[in-house]
Amino acid sequence: MKRYINPYSFLILMAAFISACKVSKDVATPKAELPANFRNAANTSDTSSIADIQWKSFFTDATLQKLIDSAIAKNYDMQIAVKNIEASQLLFKQVKWNYVPELNLNVTANTNRPSNNSITGLSIAQYNIGTKHVEDYNANLGLTWEADIWGKIRNQSRSALASYLQTAEAKKLLQTNIVASVSQGYYNLLMLDDQLAIAQKNVKLNDSTLRIIRLQFDAGQATLLAVQQAEAQRLSAAQLIPGFEQNIAIQENAIKILTGSLPDRVERTVRLEEVAIPENLSAGVPSAVVSRRPDVKSAELALTIANANVGIAQANMYPSLTITGTGGLNTFKASNWFTIPASLFGTVAGAVAQPLLQHRQLKTQYKVALVDREKTVLQFRQSVLNAVGEVSDALVKIEKLKTQQGIIADRVSTLQKATSNANLLFKNGQATYLEVITAQSNVLQSELDLATVKNARLNAVSDLYRSVGGGWK
């Protein structure tokens, strides 16, 4: 006895059997070419990293912590990043419903008065149903389901998940940049405060020198040229003050905008010389940076999206299997519409669609997806290379700026002593006014340089913390 096989059941079983088929092969995340240690790393045996330190433990200044807290909470770019995460999460949840069949409710009622000379009109007259109108009342549920034979829906889900994770990494990256930017802006503000105080102190010193030279000029012991030279030196120091005051206001405005506030004064309770620079900063090993840096993780997720896009583009070239079913109530009289089971009806259909004329276009889209995937691999490698380079740059800056600061500090100390000696000798008539002016000019520039170099060291430390992936914890 032969057993009858329902063709629609066969289609469904076949779809379930081959739904796990995969038409494209993923490209694995490439192994980046990484050195064993960063260039200029002081301790190559230490695998720990400052990236593991929470930013509140790394930046211990209470005023700076308050500014960073405000920036993370109120910065508009951060708020936009949060909204991007919310939107991406909604899209990811929606893609999950692609596996669920589409179900529609249809309710229709219509009437038609056919021509007496039409087939329908002649049929009505022949059966003598008592009316020349043809009525139709229909209420049904229609179901449509596309079998995920080639993994198109699965790849859509993978792409949506990776896009969602990318937005999360984008928020982390933005936070690391904000932490670094606020800290560097704060240190720059302290430097400008210090340089303003240096300029004001130097103006007072020049005032004292100018007063003595004028007294000597009145007594006939100095020339008018000496007075003019001393006045020019005083004005040279005085012109720095409005420039520093301008830069302070601009820097304060920039910090306030970063923190999501209107431009205003920024409170600070410490001076630049009171800020301690941490020693023995460990960057860890290069391989760990790949997993910590949000931009590198985002580039890795981009490869997942590119793999999914290749799978989707290739699946579009293959046949699609669609199962449809409709069931409900149908009648030609409203009074019999909900008569059960007489008004019940149902249909099931399966369709296989193969693109023909669009094949060239779909094939081009597939090839473009392959090229995009190759570009994504290159971008991932470039992001790793940039990360290693940024860490190495920060390390060499910290090392060399420390040496520079020591040299300039010794120069400042020497010049401060020289200025004191020049003033004493000048008052006793054993030094010329030019020697005093030169000494004052040299100490001014050296003290300004010392503040600049210390600020550069602090910025390099912040840059190292950011470049190793710290700041988002």
Image (tube, rainbow, N blue to C red):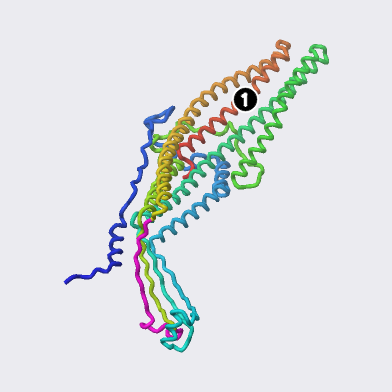
93 lies left or right of 411:
left
**Residue 37: x, y in percent?**
39, 30
Q: In which quarter of the image is residue 300?
A: top left
Q: Can you say whether 255 is above or below 325 in the image?
A: above
Q: Which residue is drawn at 69% across and 28% down?
A: 240
**Residue 379: x, y in percent?**
44, 39
Q: Can you say whether 41 is above or below 107 in the image?
A: above
Q: In which quarter of the image is residue 231?
A: top right
Q: Can you say whether 104 is above or below 22 in the image?
A: below
> Disc 1 designates what residue?
447
Q: Can you say whether 246 is above or below 360 in the image?
A: above
Dot 1 falls on a residue whose secondary structure is helix
Bounds of the magenta segment:
333-354
Q: The residue under label 1 is which amino acid type? A: Glu
Residue 365: in sight, yes or no?
yes
336 is within the stretch colored magenta:
yes
